[in-house]
Image (cartoon, coloured by chain):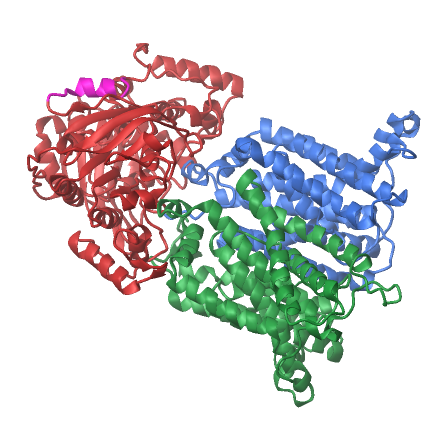
Chain colours: A blue, B red, C green
Amino acid sequence: MFGGIDPALLISALMVASVPIILAAIGELVVERAGVLNLGVEGMMIMGAVCGFIVSVQSGSAVLGFVGGALGGAAMALIFGVLTQFLLANQVASGLALTLFGLGLSSLMGQSFVGIRPPATGAVPFGPLADIPFFGRVLFSHDWVVYLSIASVAATWWMLKATRTGLILRAVGESHDAAHALGYKVRRIRMLAILFGGAMAGLGGAYISMVRVPQWTDGITSGAGWIALAIVVFAAWRPWRALVGAYLFGGISVLQLNLQAAGARIPVEYLSMSPYLITILVLVIMSSGKGKAALNAPASLGQNFHASR
Amino acid sequence: MTRPELLRVEGVTKAYPGVVANSDVSFAISEGEIHALLGENGAGKSTLVKMIYGLVKPDSGRMTLRGAAYTPAEPRAARASGVAMVFQHFSLFEALNVAENVALGMENPPPMKELASRIRQVSADYGLPLDPNRMVGDLSAGERQRVEIVRCLLQDPKLLIMDEPTSVLTPQEVEILFRTLRQLSAEGTAILYISHKLEEIRTLCDEATILRRGKVVATCTPRDRSAREMAELMIGATLTPPERAGGTKGATALEVVDLSVASPIPFGTSLKNVSFRVAKGEVLGIAGVAGNGQDELLLALSGEVRAAQGAVKIDGAGVGHTGPNDRRALGLVAAPEERLGHAAAPDMSLVENALLSGALRKGLTTRGFIDWTATEAFAAGIVKDFDVRTPGTHVAARALSGGNLQKFVVGRELSQTPSVIVINQPTWGVDAAAAASIRQAILDRAAGGAAVVVISQDLDELLEIADTFAALNEGRLTQPRPVAGLTIDEIGLMMGGAHGMEVAHHGH
Amino acid sequence: MLRLEKRPSPSRFWQGATPVLAVVLTMIAGGLMFAALGKNPFEAIRTIFWDPLFNAQFASYSRPQLLVKAGPLILIAIGLSLGFRAGIWNIGAEGQYIMGALFGAGVGLAFYPADHWFIFPLMVVAGAFGGWIWAMIPAVLKTKFNTNEILVSLLMVYIAQNFLSSMSLGLLRNPEGGGFPGSRNLSQYPAASNPELIAGTGLHWGVIAAFMAVIAAYILLQRHILGFHIKLAGQAPRAARYAGVNPTGLVVLCMGISGALAGLAGLFEVSGPAGQISIDFNVGYGFTAIIVAFLGRLNPIGILLAGLLMALTYIGGELAQFMLGLPAAAIQAFQGMLLFFLLAVDLLSNYRIRFATKKEAL
């Protein structure tokens, strides 16, 4: 089955393929740890994708493009935050609204950018390190966003585990009433988490339009946001497991693309539905087994907070 | 000996839309004094302490701490001024461990390792043993309270506020707590002690401020007053204890045999081999500290949690495997503890809430189609018979005060001519007059031949209305015993004594 | 500073007024968006909301389109609203719509070119079954394995889309279509077609089904204990269990109804207005129906009105695209905006806004 596929190439490709999912999933993981369920990841990603693309094309700078993508995602998250934290709107419905709106607005904004190539995001020059057999290809041949995505996993893990910020974040997600009684500003903390989640999703989206594809087409994220949401459940709200989940997913996407290219006997449509099928399968495995994952879920996930008295 | 004044509250007023929670409240506490704040539910005790702790700002009035103006903007500021608070509910995080919970309540916590050793030391000094690495969700109610107390003690408070601390403790644990509080008082820490339990205030407190409907009605020295005098000050009327008709017991109506179910609640307590029987006309009182399986027992009896067929029998028929409506059909009604969200849907009208559990026994539906006229009449009947104060039957359940909603919920169940009644915390958070009428209604049904199970954390209530008494302790039920002749020590031991704290010794 | 204060009982006035307010706010914000695109906002709003119905030049074409577009939206939204009321979030109606169309068209094409009276009724049953079975996957996974139905139902849309393209390129491809993707045209196969019943109205069997669904849902929610249990389960899940509602049964029921109705919508569309199975058969009705359900406040009568309004934005949007060169995506963004404003002003039915005179801790 692996016939003509070089394992080093495969691993290196899956690391790139999973970057958008890692970034978005880590962002959403932080949001959910703070007790907020933002189902608008897809909408934030696609806005990040279009904003990143436009900024990078206009400025000619890939770095500025990623900044623009993060800002685009955060702007969408701001709408979600105002709706759910200040106007106490239902989080599920608000997340869906974000996705529906994002899909429409991004296609509107991207209209005049179809068929243009964005500036390249080059590989980080590791010099001779990149020439090490196998490991050079796998570890030292990527662009900076790949390393950023891994660093963000490590930083989030450390933040949640060892810092006071992480402790407060978890406390707010566990019981907003108790956190409020101790004098923590529940709304402010959640708002910051939501903005962070939006910026990360925006970065992930920008990576799709600027590196993965790289051009603009409508609906370019094609469900990556939903898969990121599933990865968070798969990860049981733990950063390193989100990385594993994203690599697993990236591996399957790369493999099915390779199989398509290699002209496998299976029809293209069935190969391209496989990542979604596998995601569902993984969700089922994680969610069953007497709710092991459910036990790790932040206790106030999805509930709105309003200090009555 | 006169001690220097610590906190003075002068003319504090706080109004919410529709209610004046505190009106011109004044009192003072000296250093090392144990000061009681006494009042019924809704008298304004909680609002007052929330202002002292910086959670709520007064509309007018002033507070001084050691002579200087004291206006805490938030709890953080209050803690910095040496004011600490032990909450009755809602301030612990179940999925975090003890040390993390403590750290969250401190301004500048030391690194976790150091904090853990300080927790061990302080908790040992004050006779409140605690393991910093345990998950709070796995602790008993008494142990959770220790976490809160230790969290306060680590910050050397000058004033410690305790909100209804004994409602989650066994009599033996209360003893230990009082020893700790006296030790603190001797070291100069003032304690503001909120309660509506008169006897314990008389044993513990130096001074008492009595609140009624948001106003200070009296200040007294509790030791010099009788419990009855203080009760009348607190309630503003004389209460008559419920009447009991010496009913005759009939055949067994409800039998529970070796009932074991896993808890559906996260960090809940599973029931283990619970057995008892209740005869027609009998009231069985089930005591226990919060979180020892009360909620689970109600769920298993009402049918919301299923068990083996023979584990629950109504009039001899095994119903353990059936759901709530099958059991209602056989005459069993149940009223859960939590009114809003469990016994009633907050945003639905009283009419809809009457339908919620009354549809079957009151025949309010035909082939599934709802007879709204009959349902309205049923709701109006409950409102009238149980004196529910409401502008009408079309208001949402959440608009009613706790006491009125409780009267509605209990009334709804008792109006269904039940043969078996199961009630969890029938008068929790209800004012004394409403509580008395609810208890009377329960006793009337028992006198009429219904078998009654009352689960409650209020021992006085159980001793007042129950014929037989049992206690839940970590999901196990003790052998039921006749109430007549039980001593408070025996009851305490049935409830689990001091939950392994007997070994605790005081450091000083 | 503004302060929110919870109302003792939800305000009936605002429950009715919030959708209207949301529409007005969306028109203002949408007008600004159109202005930013360099169009005259007043002209754009008029072209979208007025011209399709009352402009002599376009109305004859546009008016029938109103029912054609509103039919599937209402049919799907009614199904979704039952689940949303019960706190069961089926957001994969788009996939169920596709599967309904595939199953229904598949049955019809299997009989080609036979002529029997039972072919179309059989297709209706198959369409409902296709949607139902697709919705049962997330429903059963939720009840058996506690899997999140939101994620699964949504991921199933992507699978259905791939399935659709596989079918229109493979099994269902028109053998006489010269190798082009897409099935035979069912509107040219009388035994399997869903024609316009009264010329010039746009009325077809799908619209009649939508009206029937509105009436049935109204009776269910107002008069039947099952409807009461659906509402109860959404508002207070523990109270529902106390009332004897079986949560598993409710998930299966609500997902099943919404899936079957979405499948029906797909079948009526493929056998009528669309005519054939093709790669781009689905146009997002399944997602827009979510907006319709919320805009109608999950109330059957409200959904009827909201469906008509949303259909108007589709037709008006096409008109504006044709007349003013307004991009098609602008209408999609406009619809998304409507949902935002709706969620934002919804607060007014449960809370009062007070202007605090002093600094007040919330």
Q: Position of residue C263 (x, y in %)?
A: 62, 60
Residue B489 covered by magenta stretch = yes
Q: Which of B306 and B184 lies nearest the eye of the viewer?
A: B306
Residue C97 covered by magenta stretch = no
Residue occupying the point 42% across, 58% down = C227
Instruction: Name which quarter of the figure residue C334 lies in.
Output: bottom right
Q: Which of A289 and A63 lies nearest the eye of the viewer?
A: A289
Instruction: Name which quarter of the figure residue B232 lies in.
Output: top left
Tell which residue pokes out farthest to the bottom in this image: C56
Q: Position of residue C145 (x, y in %)?
A: 56, 38
Residue segment shown in magenta: B485-497
Residue occupying the point 63% across, 52% down = C134
Q: Position of residue B283 (x, y in %)?
A: 17, 33
Q: Is residue A155 visible?
A: no
Figure check: B474 above or below C183: above
Figure check: C194 above or below B281: below
Q: Is residue C163 visible?
A: yes
Image quarter hosting the C terminus of chain B: top left
Instruction: Name which quarter of the figure residue C36 lies in.
Output: bottom right
Residue occupying the point 71% across, 32% down = A244
